[in-house]
Image (cartoon, rainbow, N blue to C red):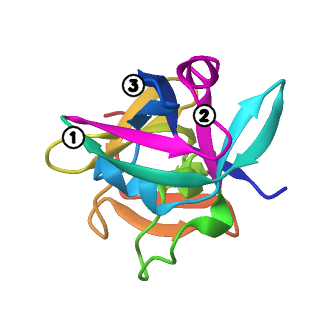
Amino acid sequence: MSEMIVVGKIAGVFGVQGWCKVFSHTSPRENILQYSPWYLKRDGEWQSIKVKQGRKQGKGIVAKLESINDRDDAAALNGIEIAIKQSQLPDLPKDEYYWSDLIGLEVETVTGVQLGKVAEMMATGANDVLIIKGDQEILIPFLQPDVVTEVDIKAGLIKVDWDPEF
């Protein structure tokens, strides 16, 4: 199976007919409903499940999944991560990247100083931030082309115009 990308998790039950509350990592939150099937990690393996219906409910998302027919079935899924296959993601325009593509890439300055690897990403109001783990943790704004000068997914490398002492 191709690489799985976690896009949310089952956060509880909704009603008595097997609907689940969903915590979505997508932006906007309801975008999680555009993907079907979902893959739920059960007994250590990703298992495919079709999304029959879904909608916004208050500030959250609820979904009706195939073969989940009552409150007990839905409750058994509580806390389980929801993933999709990377191939389910739409293609992005040039110079735009999914966070999952950036995590794990090596980061070096334009002068060749190794800073570490992208451990995670963080959203701020202004821009996304690379969280680099190496000898120390470094936070670098993902600003192209001013700070992030090059992203080479195939080579596993991000080049940044950044003072390693900062």
Q: Dot 1, crowdedness within 10 Å: few (<14), some or many (≥20)?
A: few
Characterize the local packing of mark 2: few (<14), some (14-19) or many (20 or more) Cα atoms within 10 angstroms. Answer: some
Residue in the image at 57% along x and 26% along y: 70
Please tell me which residue is depicted at 68% across the width and 41% down the height of the picture: 67
- Visible in this render: residue 110? no
Residue 157: percent from left, percent from top = 61, 59
Quadrant where the N terminus sits is bottom right
Which span is picked out in magenta? Answer: 59-84
Question: Is 99 in front, or is 142?
Answer: 99
The local secondary structure at tag 2 comes to: loop
Which residue is located at x 45 percent, y 76 percent? 92
Instruction: Report the mark closest to the observer, 1 or 3.
Output: 3
Q: Could you classify mark 3 by the number of other residues whose Cα lies within 10 Å: few (under 14), some (14-19), or many (20 or more)?
A: few
Q: Which image quarter is the C terminus in?
A: top left
| For residue 140, above or below residue 45 | below
Amino acid type for the residue under numbered disc 1: Thr
- Taking the magenta stretch, the answer to whether it contains residue 70 is yes
Mark 3 residue element = loop
Helix, strand or loop at mark 1: loop
Task: Please name the residue shown 63% across and 24% down the image.
Answer: 73
Residue at the spot of label 1: 124
- Residue that label 2 marks: 69
